[in-house]
Image (cartoon, rainbow, N blue to C red):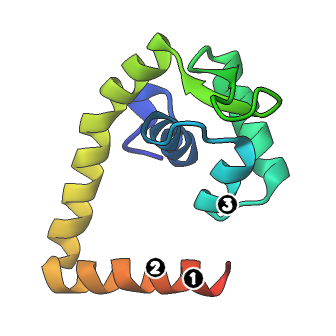
Amino acid sequence: DRFLHPAGLRGTQSAMLMLSATNKDITVGDLSERLGMDQSTATRGVKVLYKMGWIAFAASRDDARKKVLVLTSQGIDKIREADPLWEQAQAKIENALKTDPFDRLLGLLDQIADITK
């Protein structure tokens, strides 16, 4: 969060924007599942992104009754602003942990995500 602060983002908001950008037809439910959070928490987070003008809702290509998240041009700009900050944070973590411990940490996080599904 500290690294993303200059862009006006928190880590979870950045993750939500990135997932919305890289996954077509993603719903709030999909987002909550991918981020390992409950639906109500994801909904609150999405509402903030919507109010900021960074995402919009659209009908799914497959099912017009289903609402999906779509990045707005402001959302794309926000990702572009935050990306170098995120890269700095990642580099700092990698340098502090060195490659082997960092890879082990990522593996442990994957295991935790699998266990908590």
Numbered badge on residue 33: 3
Q: Mark 1 points at which residue?
A: 114
15 up-or-down from 79: above or below: below
Q: How far apart are marks 3 and 1 (CA)?
A: 11 Å
Tag 2: amino acid: Asp
Numbered badge on residue 100: none
Tag 1: amino acid: Asp
Instruction: Give the percent coordinates (x, y) of residue 59.
Output: 71, 24
Quadrant in the picture for the C terminus: bottom right
Q: How crowded is mark 1: few (under 14 residues within 10 Å), some or many (20 or more)?
A: few
Query: Do the CB atoms of the residues marked 1 and 2 lie less than 8 Å apart?
Result: yes
Q: Is residue 43 left or right of residue 70?
A: right
Q: Residue at x 68, y 32 (%)?
A: 68
Q: In this view, does 50 lie to the left or right of 110?
A: right
Asked whether 70 or 82 is in front, the reply is 70
28 up-or-down from 57: above or below: below
Q: Residue at x 78, y 34 (%)?
A: 66
Q: How far apart are marks 3 and 2 (CA)?
A: 14 Å
